[in-house]
Every structure is written in C-alpha cells, then in structure tokens.
Amino acid sequence: MQEALALAARARYRCHPNPQVGCVIVRDGQVVGRGYHQRRGGPHAEVHALREAGDRARGATVYVTLEPCSHHGLTPPCADALIAAGVARVVAAMADPDPRVAGQGLARLRAAGIQVEVGLLEAEARALNRPWLHWIARRRPYVLLKAGLSLDGKIAAASGESRWITGEAARTHAHQVRDQVEAILVGIGTVLQDNPALTARPPAPGPLALGWDLPAPVRHSPALTWATDLGPWEPRHPLRVILDSLGRTPLTAAALPALVAVTPVAPRERVAALEAAGAEVLVLPADRNGVVSLPPLLEELGRRGIVSLLVEGGGQVHWSFLAEGMADGALFYLSPRLLGGRSAPGAVAGPGFRRLAEAPRLRQPVVEPVGEDLMVVGDLEYPAAAPGAEAEGA
C-alpha cells in the first residue's frame, strides 16, 4: 500500500479536482501492475495498473489508495473494470467520501464476489489527499497561509525591505509549493508594495507540498520520479488572485492577468480598465469592514474546481483569513535573522485575538530545516468558541 501511496503522489495534484490515487496489483507475491491517476480526464489508477497486469490480474490482489469509483464521469467506473478483470481481492486504504461514490464502489465489488478490505494506511491516504478531502467536504479550497519571516516574526524590516529575509533553499521550496497549488492570493497592499509576479519558478519538482506528514518515501516521490513518466519538467503557474476592494491594482502589475476580487463600490472605470488589461474582475459583497467578503470568494473558487489556495498575505490578509476561520493550514519559513522595529510588519496583523484561548494553533506541526531556515507547517485548529476579533482586509 505504501508503494501505491508513493505512486499517487507522483501526480503532484495535477489531477485536481479529482483525488490522487495509486494502485498496485499483486499476484503470487509478485507485483504485476502499477498505476496512478495522472491528470483529470485521463485513465484512473486502477486502469493503468490493469493494463500493465493484463491477464495476470485474474485472481490477484489489488491495493488502491481510495475506494474504486462506481460512477460514469469523464471515464468509466473502475469498480466495473476490476470486476471484469477477475481480481480476487481489493484492499482500499479508505472509502471515497465523494457523494457519487460513498461506498457504492465497495458494495459493487462485494456483490461480484470480490473480497474487500478497507482501512490499511488510512491516515496516510488522508494526508495524501488533504486538500481534496477538504474540498469535497466543504466545497471550498484548502487555504494555506504562507510567509517568510524573521525569528522575531517580521516579514520586512522597518524600512519595508523584505528581499530576502529567507535563504535560497526556502525560496526554492516556496516555488515548489506554488507549482502544486491551484491558486495563489495576495492583497492589494502586497501588490502595491512588492509588485510580485506570483508565478511558480522552481528548478525541479519538490516534495508533495500539502503532504508534510506523509512518510518520506511517499512525500518525496514526486521529486524523485518526475522524469520517469510525465515527460520534461515544466512548472505549473497557479491562478493569481488579488484582493482589491476598490480596484486599485496598477494596470502594469506583474501579477496580471489575474482574478481581481472587488466590492460593488469599486469605480466602474477602474473595473473596465482592469478588464482591458487582461484581468477577470469578480465583484463580490463587502463584509462589515467594507472589504471583499472571504466566504463568497472561497465559494466561487471552490465552484471553479480550485482545490487548494496559497495565501501569501501580507499580514492584514493573513489576519482576515484567521479571524474568519477560513485559514486551514500555515506554512512559515523562519529565518535566523532578528529584525526588531515597532513599525516593522509582522506575518499576522489586524487587531489580534483578545485572549490566548481564542487563538488558532497548528495541530501536530512539522518542523524541518530548509537550508539555513526552519520550515514550520501544519493544519490549523480553532477553539470551539467563535474567533474573538473582527476581520479586516484589503
């Protein structure tokens, strides 16, 4: 099953909004077929593995990281393919929570007389598909806050200088993360201050970006195997999203073309100018502070099949997501520098939570060295009570 997980990780989330799935077929103690779902619309993992196995699949055991599908989507049901191949046993790491499947694939296999087992390495299978499971359950993307900061929590010096707080290895890793998410978001303040391009420019694939708690052979599978089956390396640029309530994004901004989220009070002439410059302008309701409301934005991204969203702030935008309870994870690169300065911006701004008990925290964080810096990453968990301060945004 671990080999199936490592196979699935090779997709590097390129199959979204479908899940990452790997499959290994074993007969008489020998692996006779391997496969994984590479791209949406392409063959599923089980089909790749069955094609490799051929007649040797009859009477074999199938290890698959997710319940075989039972519905007709862009491809036929995998459960039917396994039945037709005459496999004897299917071991699935977890059931499929997609309402179109939800146990029906396993039931179909059992009805055909195939022995079915579920739950082997389920925790790892869930980590493999962390953003997809979130999207299926909530129909909005998994939101990962990301920042490079000094040891005392500053994302820039008091002068505003921020390039570069972290070292080259951390910046390379950050670009490898960008390569594996569907969208990246900043606020208008970051656009005006830094004019970022928000593209992915890694020299090669990195470890599975949102699978930080996977076993090393699974997590690092994309970096070790990319040249073997997906052809020449080419990074994927995420959809660029700008929170810009009043439509102030410069027409020459390096991030354009992008999805620019504004409120209804944004001047019509600015909206027209941005559209002429190649932006897609999305008019959304304002929240109680008069800025773009985050829930409708995330709902719209989810509707478009955006499964993961990397939020690169700055601090005010990070605070808005935290205060609304809309940040699902955090990825911080800690530099050994100490910057100080009352006016130096921090990774999270805003009024802050009034009490420690109200503040979210990382659940079972992973801490790893990345070059000269430290990476701290994990899922966020919120107290049972509602957040204790109002959100403010761009």
Image: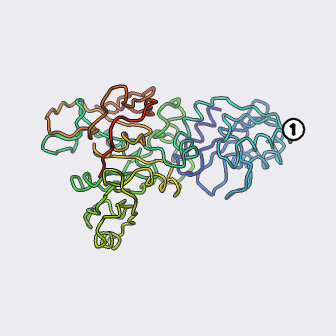
Determine whether, in the image, residue 30 is placed left or right of residue 374: right
Q: Which of 55 and 271 lies nearest the eye of the viewer?
A: 271
The answer, for residue 167, to whether it is visible in the render is no
State the image quarter where residue 324 is shown. Answer: top left
At x 24%, y 38%, the residue is 346
The answer, for residue 315, to whether it is visible in the render is yes
State the image quarter where residue 285 is shown. Answer: bottom left
Q: Which of 253 and 29 lies nearest the eye of the viewer?
A: 253
Residue 228 against residue 63 in the figure, above or below:
below
Mark 1 residue type: Gly
* Mark 1 nearby-residue class (10 Å; few <14, some 14–19, many ≥20): few
Q: Which of 260 and 388 lies nearest the eye of the viewer?
A: 388
Determine whether, in the image, residue 111 is placed left or right of residue 356: right
At x 73%, y 34%, the residue is 91
Find residue 220 and report its horizontal and vertical position in percent: 49, 36
Find residue 348 and report its horizontal and vertical position in percent: 29, 38
The residue that disc 1 covers is: 113
Find residue 77 and report its horizontal and vertical position in percent: 74, 51
Q: How many marks?
A: 1
Find residue 370 and report its horizontal and vertical position in percent: 34, 33
